[in-house]
Amino acid sequence: MNSATRWSAEDWAAGASPMGQALAYLSFGVFYFALAWYATDLPVQTRFPHFIWPADGLVLGTLLVAAPRRWPVYLGLVFLANLFFGYELGVSLPRTFVASFVNTAEPALVALGLQQLAKPQVTIDTVKGLAAMLIGMVPLVAGLSIFDALTSYVQFDAPFREQWSVVFVSDMLGMILVAPLILAWSREGWREAMQASRSRLPELVVLYSGLVFTAHYVFGTRSQASGFIPPLAYLCAPFLIWAALGFGLRAATLGLAAFGLICYWHTAQGFGPFSIDGIADWKSILHLQAYLATIVVTTLFAAALLNERQDAAKTTRAWRRRYEAVIRASGNLLYDLDPATGKILWDGDTMAVIGVAPENVSELGPWMSRTHPDDRARLRGVREQLEGGKLRHMAIEYRMQRDDGSYVPVSVNGYMIEEPMSLGPPKKRLIGFVTDVSEKIKSEEDRVRLESQLKQAEKMEAVGHLAGGIAHDFNNILGAILGYGELAQLKAKDEDMKRYLDTIMNAGNRAKSLVTQILSYSRVDTGERIPVLVSPIVQEAVDLIRGSTAGVDVRYEPESGEATVMGDPTRLHQLFMNLCTNAVHAMPDGGVLDVSLAIEVVEHARITRIGELGPGDYVRVTVKDSGHGIAPEVIDRIFEPFFTTKRAGRGTGLGLALVHSVVKEHKGCLDVQSELGKGTAFIVWMPRLNEAAVEAAKPEPALPGRGQVILAVDDEIQVLAALEEMLANLGYEPAGFSSSQEALEAFQADPKRFDAVVSDEVMPEMSGTSLAVELRRMKPSIPIVIATGYGGAGFETRALSAGINRVLKKPYRMTEIAEALAGFFPNR
C-alpha cells in the first residue's frame, strides 16, 4: 500500500474514460454529501457555515490530483451541495449564498496556492513534500480564516480573535485529515492497491478492527472525573503507527480519517477524555483538535519517512541489480579481500567465469591452494609486497584449478584501499577483478600462428623469386642435355652405350623434376581447373608406391568412389605421391602405410596447419605411417622449403613444401598429427564438387609429321640445335633461328612457307609472345607453340590471350613436341 509511484494529476485525469470521469464526479458528490451531512449532525454546530467541515479536505485533495479543466465541475458540485444544506438548515438565502461561496472558494484557493508553491505537483510521500504541504497550508488557511472570522464578526457580532482561532484550527485540521487520503490513494491505481493489500488482508482486518474498537472505547466513554483528564487518549496511537510503518501512506491516511471522524463524533456528543463534565462545548473540541493535529502530523511523517526508506531500498535494489548485471555481462568477477582475516566477498557468477563455487573460494587460503604449483612462488612475492604497503596496485596472470580439476588462466588485478575507522588506524582492503583470459591467450596464440604463416608465405615467395631467376638458364642447360640425350638414345646401337645414355637421361629427368618442384610450390597461377575424380589419382599413387617399395605394407581404403574436386590432376598426383613418399621414408625398417579417402561434412569452422577449415563438404585424404614420428620442436618447420631431417644426400627439403603449395592452390586445408615412436598422419581437405565422376581420357599416340615446315626460335644455340634434331626426327622440316628478329624477317619474306612456330619465351631482342603477335598479323591462322622454363604468375593466361595455341615447359621433350604439333595437323 505504499504510494511510491508518483503520477501527475494530468496523467491521472487524462487516463480516465468519459464513463470513468462521470463515475469520479458522482463518487465525489456522494462522499462530499456524506461528509457534509456528518458535519451538520454534530451537536456543537450552531451556525452555517459550520466550523467542523471535513468535506473541505475532500475538495482540497480532489483539486490537487485533478486536471484544472475538471475543477469547475467539482466546485459546482460543492456549491450546489452547500446551497442544499443551507436550505435544509433554514438559513436565509443571502447567508446561504455567502456560506456556499466560502466553503467553495476556501479549498480552491488553498489548492491554487499549494500548486504554485510546490510546482510541479503537491506530494506527501516524502518528508520534504509533506513538510512543504503543511507549511504552505498554514499561511493560506490562516489568511482565509481571517476573511471568514471577519464575515462572522460583521454578520453575527462574534468575537474576532476567538472566531479566527476556531475557524483556523477547524479548517486546517479538516483539510489535513482528509486531503492526504485523496493524495495517497490517487498516486497508484486501485488495482495495484488491492493487489498489495490482498496478501496482507488478515493483518489489515486486525489493524482497522482494533483501531475502530479502541477509538470507540476511548472516545465513547463519558469521563468520570471533572476537568481535563485524558488517561487513555493515546491508546489508539499504536494502531496508527502500525498502519504508517507497516503499510505506508494509504493505510495511515485511511486510518487517520476514520479515527478523526470517530473522535469528532463522540467528543461533540460530550463523550471521551477531552469532554469536561460530560458537556459538549468548543473548548473540548479545541482540545481534541490539538490532540488530533499531533496524531495526524506524527503519523503522516512516520508514513512519509517509511515511504522514503522503501523508495531508497527500491533504488538500492535496482542499482544492485544493474550492478550485478553489468558484472555478469562483462564476464568478470569482483572481489573484496580483507588481508587481515583472509575473507573474500565475491560479486558475479564464479561458476560461469572460473568454474568454482563461491563457497569454495571464500577465503584466501583455499584460493591460493588452487593456484598452479608453478605460479605460487610468484604470487607469494606479490602478496608480501601488498601486505607490506610496498605495492598499491597489482595486475597478474596465472593458472588456477577449477572444481572439475582442470586449470584455467585468469587475470587478477587489484587496488589496495584504506577504509577509515572510527577508532584505530584505517582498515586495508584489496578490491579488484578476476577475469578468465582463456580467449585472450587463444587469440594471442592465433596471432602468433598467423604471423608464422605470414613469414612462411614470405619465405616461400622469396624462394619463388629466386627460382624464377635461375629456372630459365638451368632449363636451357637441361634442354641441351635432355634433347641430345634423347636423340642419342634413338641412334645408339651398342648396349653399353644405351645404358650410359639411359643413366644420363635419368639424371637429367631428376634435375628437371627438381626444377619443376622448385617452381611448383612458389607459383601463383596454376592454370586451368577441371572437375577431377580423386580416387583414381590416389589409387595410381598408391600403386606406384606399392610397386617400388619393399618392406612397407601399403593399404588403401576409399570410403567413397565419387569424391570429386575442382583441380589440376597433375598437381594432385604430385601431392599424393609426395605424401606417400615422405611416409615411406619415415619407415626405413618397414611398417604400415594407411591411405584413406572419404567425404566429410564440416559443420563448425576449425583451425588447421594451413588456414581455417570452414563449414561445408570436403574430400578428405589421410596418409598415415607407423614410422618414427616428427619431433615437436621441428613440426612447425616441416613445410619450409629446403628444410629436411634426412641425412645429407637423401632429401631436397622440397617434398612437403610442394604439398603445402598444392593444397593452397586447391583452396584446401592440411593438418599434421604426430607422436614420436608411433607415427605421423597427414590429413588433406579439399572442397568437394557434387558432379559426376571424371574419367581420364586415354591419350592416343601422336602421328609423325609429313614434312611441314616448322619455324624454330631459341636464343640458346645448343638448345636450338637439339630442337631442330627433334623436329627432323618427328618428320618435320625445321627452320631454326637463334634471333627472334631474324626469325621475324624470314617470316615476313615468305609467310606461306611456314606451317607452325615453336619458340622460346625469354629472348634478348623480342620475347616469344611479342614475336607471336607480329606473326599473327601476317598470318592469323598459323599455329604457335611457346616454351618457357618459368613464365611467372599468369603467364599461360597472357600467352593464350596473345594468340598462343599451346604452352610447353622447358626443357623440350620430343613426346611433348610431337603431341602438340600433332594437334595442329590432325588430317594429314
Image (cartoon, rainbow, N blue to C red):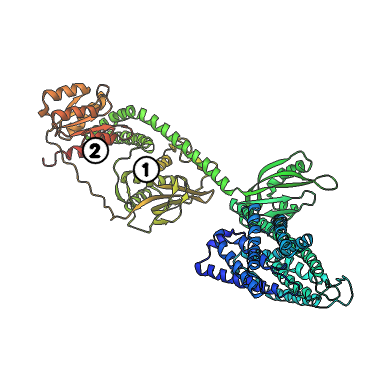
Which percent across, then down, holds residue 304? 71, 60
Residue nearer the viewer, 326 or 524: 326
Position of residue 127 in the picture relative to residue 665 (left or right): right
Q: Give above or below for 10 relative to 809.
A: below
Amino acid type, callout 2:
Glu
Q: Is residue 709 left or right of residue 414?
A: left
Where is residue 781, by image quadrant? top left
Given the image, on which type of amino acid does mark 1 rest? Glu
Q: Is residue 150 above or below residue 28?
A: above
The mark found on residue 247 in the picture is none
**Residue 585 in the image: above or below residue 137:** above
* Residue 390 falls left or right of residue 75: right
In the picture, the quarter occupied by the N terminus is bottom right
Please report whichever mark, 2 or 1, sits nearer to the chain's N-terminal start. 1
Find disc 2 in the rendering and name its residue.
816
Mark 1 lies on residue: 665
Residue 395 horizontal/vertical position (percent): 67, 42
Q: Residue at x 31, y 45 (%)?
A: 568
Could you tell me if residue 489 is visible in this image? no
User: Where's the C terminus, which quadrant?
Assistant: top left
